[in-house]
Image (cartoon, rainbow, N blue to C red):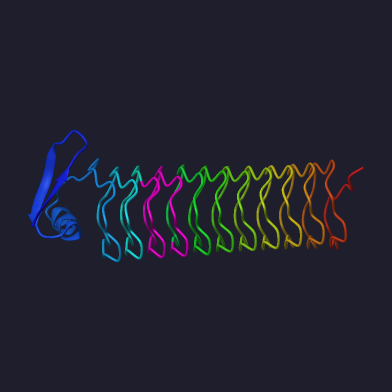
Amino acid sequence: MTTYIRKREGVELFSHEGSLSEALTVATRKGVDLSRAVLDGADLSNTDLENLNLRQVSLRGANLRGANLENVNLSGANLHEADLRGANLGNTDMREVVLADANLDGANLEKARMVGANLMGLKAQGANFERADLARANLEGSNLEGSNLEDTRLSEANLSRVNLRRANLESANLDGANLTRADLRSANLEKAALRDAVLEGANCRDANLEKAQLERANLTNACLDHAQLDRANLTAAITTGASFHEASLDRVTGFQPPE
């Protein structure tokens, strides 16, 4: 069976006698430029695609469940509605990638580079984002419940209405992030950086914010009931309408109780 890899204009980039995964591997080995190749709806589940160059490739709706994509270059690629459940995306280059409405439940994205990525509506329950770079990424309305975001860079990211319930955000960088109406119930934000972050209307009930840096953060109408805020820094934070019912506030710096 001959597999053809084409661009959207129909221009043939490469052909190979064998499966699509084999064709991609051989093409990469031969130095073929696969940028902007169209692989929409392709079934690459459980395949080994490690180290491939798939820059700007279109994989809309593709099945990559359980695939190994470690060290793959997917910068600028389009994976809208792709299935990546349980996939390995460790150390992957996904700068400005489109993963809107994709499914990354249980996937590994440790050290992935996702600066400026479009992740709106992403499903990533239980996914591992440890030490990943998601600065300026758009995660509006995504579901990251129970995910691991320890040491993850999320500065200036859009996390409005994101489900981060029970997520681990220890030591994460959320400086300047938009967490408007985010669900952070029972989340671990110990030592997280939240300077200038917007948490207006966010639900942080039972969250651990011990030693968190919340200088100048906007906590208007946020719920911090039963939250752990010991040794947190709230200097110049806006707390108008916020609720701190039975919150732990031992040795908090700069805390101004809401009127």
Q: Taking 207 as reference, is 81 above or below it?
A: above
Q: Taking 30 as reference, is 120 above or below it?
A: above
- Where residue 252 appears, as percent x and y from the top left, is 83, 57
| Part of the protein shown in magenta | 79-108
User: Between residues 93 and 45, which one lies in front from this camera angle?
Assistant: 45
Taking the view exactly as shown, the residue that stands out farthest to the top is: 9
Residue at image location 44% in from the left, 59% down from the top: 111
Q: Is residue 38 left or right of residue 254?
A: left
The quarter of the image holding the N terminus is bottom left
Count of number-bearing discs: 0
- Where residue 152 appears, as percent x and y from the top left, is 54, 57
- Where residue 20 appears, as percent x and y from the top left, is 18, 56
Taking the view exactly as shown, the residue that stands out farthest to the right is: 259
Q: Is residue 12 left or right of residue 76?
A: left
Residue at image location 13% in from the left, 43% down from the top: 13
Q: Taking 236 as reference, is 130 above or below it?
A: below
- Where residue 96 appears, as percent x and y from the top left, is 41, 42
Q: Is residue 16 left or right of residue 245?
A: left
User: Is residue 82 part of the magenta span, yes or no?
Assistant: yes
Q: Main secondary structure of the magenta part?
A: loop
Q: Is residue 131 left or right of residue 257?
A: left
User: Between residues 226 and 64, which one lies in front from this camera angle?
Assistant: 64
